[in-house]
Image: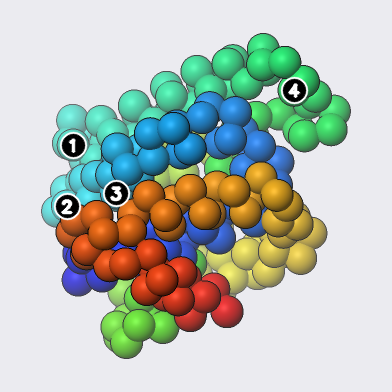
């Protein structure tokens, strides 16, 4: 199911992540999703792949190393964003803050699993619980406060509903990032899907 997971990750999870406008502001200010989107997207997909490999979160494994690398990137992005002209932490919040990281974890966990099921995959309760706990541990590796991390699928769904209700306010920046991602993937390997198909798939997955 790796190709299907990759497809859902890029056309569903990533696009939905832009719905939180303050997090989208940070991504826009780093510039890579607009200026160098395909390598940036493949980096994210490669990180997920490495985490999902057998033993992927064992110390010294590829997935473990990838998460530590992401944690360092987050630290750099926080510093960079705070010093970009016009950034107002009182208005936008701290860049790559705890809420942003928990929300991103749910994109890889709950939303990705939901997308796979929407496209016909079957996940047992045990598989969904294992998936949830995998990304909980990834959150621990990334520096998310233990008290903020979901501990079971039911708890994750409740947290997701709260974030969606109180923080989903997609704006022009959210939309520009979504268009940049989907247009950049048009005709690209490994799917070679035209842009219209990618947009239709995103609408099918997001509703």
Determine whether the residue tagged by mark 1 lies in a helix, strand or loop.
helix
Question: What is the CA distance from the residue labelled 1 to the residue labelled 2?
Answer: 9 Å
Q: Quadrant of the N terminus?
A: bottom left
Residue bearing the label numbered 3? 45
Q: Pick the residue in front: 88 or 152.
A: 88
Q: Residue at x 47, y 55 (%)?
A: 14
Residue bearing the label numbered 2? 53
Residue 143, x across and y down, in percent: 50, 33
Q: Nearer the viewer, mark 3 or mark 2?
A: 3
Residue 46, x across and y down, in percent: 24, 45
Q: Residue at x 80, y 24 (%)?
A: 88
Q: Nearer the viewer, mark 4 or mark 1?
A: 4
Q: Quadrant of the C terminus?
A: bottom right
Residue 4: name its quadrant.
Answer: bottom left
Label 3 or label 2, whichever comes before in sequence order: 3
**169 lies above or below 122:** above
Residue 141, x across and y down, in percent: 41, 36
Q: Is residue 21 visible?
A: yes
Question: What is the CA distance from the residue labelled 4 to the residue labelled 3?
Answer: 29 Å
Residue 157 left/right relative to 3: right
Q: Residues within 10 Å of mark 3 (few under 14, many from 20)?
A: some
Label 4 or label 3, whichever comes before in sequence order: 3
Determine whether the residue tagged by mark 2 lies in a helix, strand or loop.
loop
Question: What is the CA distance from the residue labelled 4 to the residue labelled 1?
Answer: 34 Å
Q: Is residue 129 visible?
A: no
């Amino acid at each position: 199911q790796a190709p299907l997971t990759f497809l859902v990750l890029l056309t569903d999870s990533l696009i939905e992540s832009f719905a939180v406008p303050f997090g989208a502001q940070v991504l826009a200010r780093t510039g890579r999703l607009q200026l160098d989107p395909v390598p940036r997207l493949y980096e994210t997909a490669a990180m997920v792949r490495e985490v999902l490999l057998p033993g992927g979160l064992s110390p010294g494994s590829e997935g473990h190393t990838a998460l530590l690398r992401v944690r360092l990137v987050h630290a750099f992005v926080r510093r960079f964003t705070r010093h970009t002209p016009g950034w107002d932490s009182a208005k936008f919040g701290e860049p790559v803050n705890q809420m942003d990281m928990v929300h991103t974890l749910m994109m890889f966990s709950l939303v990705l699993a939901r997308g796979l099921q929407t496209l016909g995959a079957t996940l047992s309760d045990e598989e969904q619980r294992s998936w949830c706990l995998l990304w909980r541990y990834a959150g621990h590796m990334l520096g998310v406060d233990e008290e903020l991390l979901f501990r079971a699928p039911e708890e994750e769904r409740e947290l997701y509903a709260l974030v969606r209700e109180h923080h989903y306010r997609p704006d022009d920046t959210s939309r520009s990032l979504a268009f940049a991602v989907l247009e950049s993937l048009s005709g690209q390997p490994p799917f070679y899907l035209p842009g219209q198909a990618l947009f239709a798939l995103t609408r099918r997955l997001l509703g």
